[in-house]
Image (cartoon, rainbow, N blue to C red):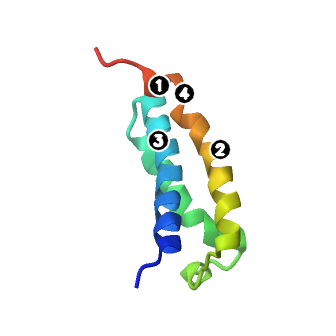
Amino acid sequence: MITVLAVITAVGSVAAPGSIFAYAYMKTENIWVPVILHFMNNNLIPIISGEYDISVLENQTTTWASLIPALILNGIIFGLFLFAKEFRKENE
């Protein structure tokens, strides 16, 4: 059964990088910039951890206590991108 915590975590983990990818595209008008950023987002965790294996991403858990600070931090960091002038620009 899908819990509310799982849904909130899933939406946050998709919306946060998505706003940066959209900002990168709107700023550069080049589709390859967000493609490369997405590739790096998907593949740097095993490299940074030094495990070089996808198993580093298995069995991750989120608790209610860690959700509120994560949402606040995501809102501050990624919200700034959403208020950038590229997102307010009118289409001609």
Q: Which is closer to the viewer, label 2 or label 3? A: 2
Q: Which residue is mark 4?
A: 84
- Residue type at the position of mark 4: Ala
* Alpha-carbon span between mark 2 and mark 3: 19 Å
Mark 2 vs 3: CB contact within 8 A: no
**Upstream in the sequence, badge 2 or badge 3?**
3
Q: Residue at x 55, y 80 (%)?
A: 54
* Alpha-carbon span between mark 4 and mark 1: 5 Å
Q: Residue at x 59, y 44 (%)?
A: 78
Q: Which residue is mark 1?
A: 86
The reply, left or right, for residue 9 in relation to residue 30 is right
Q: Residues within 10 Å of mark 2 (few under 14, many from 20)?
A: few
Q: Which residue is mark 2?
A: 77
Q: Residue 9 location in percent, x, y?
A: 53, 66
Q: Residue at x 31, y 19 (%)?
A: 91
**Upstream in the sequence, badge 1 or badge 3?**
3
* Alpha-carbon span between mark 2 and mark 4: 12 Å
* Alpha-carbon span between mark 2 and mark 1: 17 Å
